Image: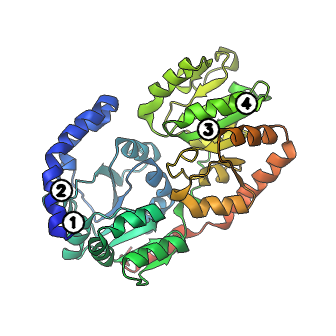
Amino acid sequence: MTRLHYSALLYLLLPFTILKLLWRGLKQPAYLEHWSERYGFYNQAASQPLIWLHCVSVGETRAAKPLIEALLDQYPAHQILLSHTTPTGREASEQLFPKEKYPRISRCYLPYDTPDAVKGFLKHYRPTLGLLMETELWFNLIASCKAQAIPLLLVNARLSERSARGYAKVGKLSALGLANLSAIAAQTEQDANRLNALLGNANKATVMGNLKFDVTPPADEAERGRYLRGLLGLKRPIFLAASTRDGEEALILEAIAASGIDNLLTVIVPRHPQRFDEVAMLLTKHHQAFCRRSEFSMGTVAGDIPNCSVILGDSMGEMFTYYAACDVAFIGGSLLPLGGQNLIEASAMGKPVLIGPFTFNFSDATDSAVQAGAAIRVHNSQELAEKLSDLMNNVEARKAMSDAALSFSKSASGATQRLMELIAKYLPNK
């Protein structure tokens, strides 16, 4: 496939994007907002030189926080533009970087990758530097930045075997897109090798580590976690199922029923907020006594919380709080072949981690955590029940895993500094 064929296909599909936005808007009304931005039309203007960073959704936005903080500090004359693809990513950036505290940060949606929309985006904002988080290969966007001499870096890049096979099917297009990037900073050696293979075994992609290891819990999260723990029960065992995906909640309910743990409280936090009501219906169907996190605030007293065995974590931006409050965490997206979610935040909070067999999206970090003794891999709901029971009944084992998690998290930090040194080659003036 050539870029001309790629562009023609996008133009053919463009009318259907309206239907897609309308359909998604039925479940998540935020998809009905800021439509013009998705087609390359913008209202807000930049009054200073601008560094642009693209973070697709929540995970990339959270991971980028240490890098964004470093950019704000090192380049005080620049504004920061965060572009997103999903409303949840945009909402996460608003929570992490509120306007009153971060007046130099603005946000928008990245347009669909048609030549006209991309040109509209670049013409309006005129960034001095662009940074694409993780694996975002938008071929017209990359070509337009190259044509306009805008340095564009792929940072914190990761590429699973499955994604590499997909990009290989459009090999020439992928190779050209990667070649037109100014630099590629990969998370791991495996990621770099796969990216370089798409380039024809070049050595353009270099290993600089994973930004998520540099994410530090907000200063008040440990305190919020202790307060939440007090509300839920200081002596009650608490199990957190974090970032669960469709189909996993039923398996988790099977596991907690089979675990035999007395007075266990399970907190289930779905990965996608549009599924909160769906999971609530599932809990009702399984006759689970549950309450929603949104039903009580941090000002609630313990006696005002209904007696329940499950808390539905239907709040945004509280994952560190949930980790701080739990005894053991399971990382979702991994019991079914969905690729898994990242366990680094849990490790940074010093929590023992259970994780399923399907972790191809974060294979290196997961394998390293297992080898370090910070995580235990389970292969089905029965093993999840067994390992959960073992840990909840063994304080020493939990303490050992907690210590290993903290050591594992600290040992892999430093990606932010390495990326800032790379960025300085393309944006030297402070």
- Judging by the rendered image, the residue that carries numbered circle 3 is 241
- Judging by the rendered image, the residue that carries numbered circle 4 is 258
Q: Of marks 3 and 4, which one's residue comes earlier in the chain?
A: 3
Asked whether the residues under the numbered discs 4 and 1 touch, taking CB atoms below 8 Å apart as contact, a structural biologist would say: no
Q: Residues within 10 Å of mark 1 (few under 14, many from 20)?
A: many
Mark 1 or 2: the one toward you: 2
Q: Residue at x 70, y 53 (%)?
A: 375
Instruction: Give how far apart the Cα atoms at labels 3 and 1 are.
Output: 39 Å
Displayed quadrant of residue 244: top right
| Left or right for 14, reference 322 | left
Asked whether the residues under the numbered discs 1 and 2 touch, taking CB atoms below 8 Å apart as contact, a structural biologist would say: yes
| Left or right for 405, reference 321 | right
- Judging by the rendered image, the residue that carries numbered circle 1 is 140
- Tell me the amino acid under the disc marked 4: Ala
- Tell me the amino acid under the disc marked 2: Leu
| Left or right for 166, reference 262 | left
Which mark is drawn over residue 318? none
The relative height of residue 118 versus residue 91 in the rendered view (above or below) is: below
Q: Residues within 10 Å of mark 2 (few under 14, many from 20)?
A: some
Instruction: Give how far apart the Cα atoms at labels 2 and 4 are.
Output: 49 Å
Which mark is drawn over residue 10? 2
Mark 3 or 4: the one toward you: 4
- Tell me the amino acid under the disc marked 1: Asn
